[in-house]
Image (cartoon, grey):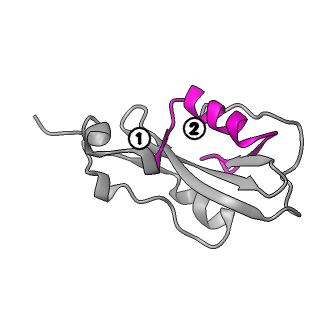
């Protein structure tokens, strides 16, 4: 599944510059939870790890955030119970992928939600 996030630069991630901030973003299209990780580096460059395992590079944190919002992602730390109620889950059940390396995260970045019973 394509995350819908468009890359900002035709460059490789700036792996020499340390990560100074990292946050998780989530979208819920078609009863699927889709995660993206935003990292901001000391150099000012930002990169997004998308659900396909691609690292999309942006010239700034603002550009990366705009791309995530354009793709209808929401910052996990800005969500409340009302935001996720329509998804049929509780905020406390919204746990981002965990792992030491990007390759550990990618298989966890998409999850089907149960169809609500009527």
Which quadrant is the C terminus positioned in?
Answer: top left
Instruction: Please tell me whether mark 1 sits on a helix, a strand or a loop.
Output: strand
Q: Is residue 2 visible?
A: no
Q: Position of residue 2 (x, y in %)?
A: 61, 35
Residue at image point 38% right, 44% down:
79
Instruction: Please tell me whether mark 2 sits on a helix, a strand or a loop.
Output: loop
Q: Which residues are magenta?
A: 49-76
- Badge 1 local density, few (<14 within 10 Å), some, or many (20+)? some
Q: Position of residue 80 (x, y in %)?
A: 32, 45
- Badge 2 local density, few (<14 within 10 Å), some, or many (20+)? few
First-in-chain label (2 vs 1): 2
Which label number is shown at residue 32? Answer: 1
Query: In the figure, 66 relative to 112: above or below?
Result: above
Which quadrant is the N terminus positioned in?
Answer: top right
Residue lying farthest to the bottom in this orientation = 100
Residue at image point 41% right, 41% down:
32
Instruction: Using the image as rendered, state which of residue 36 and residue 42 is in the foreground.
Output: 42
Alpha carbon distance from label 2 to label 1: 10 Å
Residue at image point 31% right, 41% down:
84
Q: Is residue 1 visible?
A: yes
How many numbered discs sit on the rendered protein? 2
Please check the rendered image and state whether residue 72 is part of the magenta-colored stretch, yes or no: yes
Query: In the figure, 116 relative to 97: above or below?
Result: above
Query: Cβ–Cβ below 8 Å for labels 2 and 1?
Result: yes
Which label number is shown at residue 1? Answer: 2
Q: Position of residue 39 (x, y in %)?
A: 68, 54
Instruction: Using the image as rendered, state which of residue 64 and residue 48 is in the foreground.
Output: 64
């Amino acid at each position: 599944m394509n995350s819908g996030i468009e890359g900002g630069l035709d460059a490789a991630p700036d792996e020499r510059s340390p990560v100074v901030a990292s946050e998780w973003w989530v979208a819920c299209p078609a009863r699927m939870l889709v995660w993206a990780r935003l990292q901001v580096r000391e150099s000012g460059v930002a990169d997004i790890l998308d659900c396909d395992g691609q690292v999309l590079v942006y010239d700034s944190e603002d550009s990366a955030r705009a791309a995530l919002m354009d793709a209808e992602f929401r910052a996990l730390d800005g969500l409340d119970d009302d935001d996720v109620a329509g998804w049929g889950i509780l905020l406390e059940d919204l746990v981002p992928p965990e792992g030491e390396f990007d390759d550990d995260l990618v298989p966890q970045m998409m999850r089907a939600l149960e169809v609500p019973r009527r």
